[in-house]
């Protein structure tokens, strides 16, 4: 969890195949949302770009 940050959102890259999809599902259960898929290099796995809006009421993301 990211706390006491001024940013409006947190972003990260997740391999959607990791743990047979369980890793991405865990992030989504925490309120994160996969918004795009990118492949940074032809030899790299596709990665999901994931964001989580920060909650202004408590300062947590």
Image: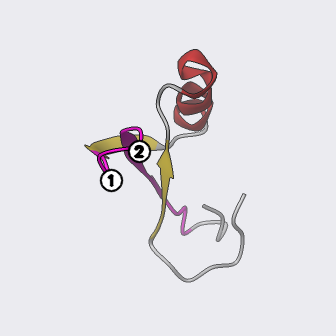
Q: Is residue 22 above or below residue 8?
A: above
Q: Which residues are magenta?
A: 38-56
Q: Residue at x 69, y 65 (%)?
A: 2
| Residue, disc 2 | 44
Say which quadrant the C terminus sits in.
Answer: bottom right
Q: Residue at x 54, y 69 (%)?
A: 56
Q: Residue at x 44, y 72 (%)?
A: 8
The 10 Å Cα crowd at callout 1, few under 14, some 14 to 19, many 20 or more, is few
- Most distant residue in the front direction: 43
Q: Is residue 41 above or below residue 27?
A: below
Residue 52: x and y in percent read 48, 54
Q: Assess whether mark 2 and mark 1 are in contact (beta carbons under 8 angstroms).
A: yes
| Residue, disc 1 | 41
Q: Nearer the viewer, residue 61 or 23?
A: 23
Q: Nearer the viewer, residue 24 or 17?
A: 17
Q: Is residue 9 above or below residue 28?
A: below
């Amino acid at each position: 969890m990211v706390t006491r940050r001024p940013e409006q959102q947190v972003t990260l890259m997740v391999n959607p195949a990791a743990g047979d999809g369980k890793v991405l599902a865990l992030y989504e259960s925490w309120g994160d949302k996969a918004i795009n898929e990118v492949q940074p290099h032809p030899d790299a796995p596709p990665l999901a770009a994931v964001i989580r809006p920060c909650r202004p009421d408590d300062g947590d993301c």
